Amino acid sequence: MGIRPTLGLVSRAGVIPYSFTQDAAGPLARTVADAAKLLNVLVGYDPGDPATAWSIGNIEKDYTKFLIANGVNGKRIGVLRSFFGNAPVHEEVNTVANKAIEDLRRLGAMVIDLNTPDLDSGKISSDISVHLYEFKPAINTYLAAGNAPVKSLEEIISSGKYHPNIDESIKKAQSLELDDGYRLRLQKRSELQQRVMKIMADGQLDAIVFPHQKRLVILIGETQVERNGGLGSVTGFPSIVVPGGFSSPTPTAQLGVPVGIEFLGRPWSEKVLIEIGYGYEQATRHRRPPSTTPPIKASIR
């Protein structure tokens, strides 16, 4: 599972940059409890990342206080139905996601279906996201400041030393400039942020829920498709993704393919998302430790 924090809660200094508007760093962990502990030591103002100045006054001293077993009870959660697929290839994910929604109701949440045909995860990524526009200037600045054998994205492309799956993306990034098209996307990003905030205000919502991807993740090395995580990435709003269950077993995934359930909230609402994520996790226990990894035993000192 993982937490994508509000943009500015965790410093990105030292992280190889992709997009200075959308990059975020957050904990990936076995459990929500582990992620909350990691968040405690990651948050805070860092002069090396000016975005963290916005976090002052918005940081919790201890995020583990929100590891509440009945954290789902009483929450108002909107279901972003426009982030569900409607083709046969989406059925496995939809089955898991719809079961998760039933579980949320069983755990005491008020669940509301949202009518949002204007919100399309594919269009958010293709028409609003600025990551490809910002990648070239971001990576060029990063490389120029270090002792890497190459100093620009153009040199990386010329070298041919990169995975074929990113060929189209990095060549597109090399061709883009911070022009009127870029500025239009920044305007659309601001409009999307306002739209999500209004949805939450109108529904008096604590969070919005949807499957992390519309379809099952594909084999390692292939390009992922129909991802829904772009909503948090583009808006900069926080989200938490927890295990929602598994697909039917396949020859390459004998336990089934895991399906993530994503909860997205208002800026600086990590504590609410941790309550929801932990409550759901503890009640459903969907995580299956990999057979290749032995249990971690706490040491006594």
Image (cartoon, helix red, strand yellow):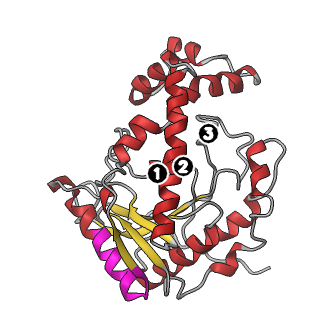
**Residue under circle 3?**
21
Residue flagged by tag 3: what amino acid is it? Thr
The answer to whether residue 224 of the structure is visible from this angle is no
In the image, what residue occupies the spot 43% across and 79% down?
285
Asked where in the image residue 265 lies, by quadrant, the reply is bottom right
Apparent side of residue 28 relative to residue 144 in the rendered image (left or right):
left
- How far apart, in angstroms, are the residues tagged by discs 3 and 1? 13 Å
Q: Are marks 2 and 1 in contact (CB under 8 Å)?
A: yes
Residue flagged by tag 1: what amino acid is it? Leu
Please, is residue 30 above or below residue 191 in the view?
below
Residue 77 x/y as whole percent? 44, 74
Q: Secondary structure at mark 2?
A: helix
The C terminus sits in image quarter: bottom right
Closer to the camera in the image, 224 or 256: 224
**Residue under circle 1?**
231
Q: Are marks 3 and 1 in contact (CB under 8 Å)?
A: no
Please, is residue 10 above or below residue 190 in the view?
below
Segment tinted magenta in the rendering = 96-110
Instruction: Check residue 235 in the rendering and tell me which mark sits there, or answer none.
Output: 2
How crowded is the residue under tag 2: few (<14 C-alpha within 10 Å), some, or many (20+)? many
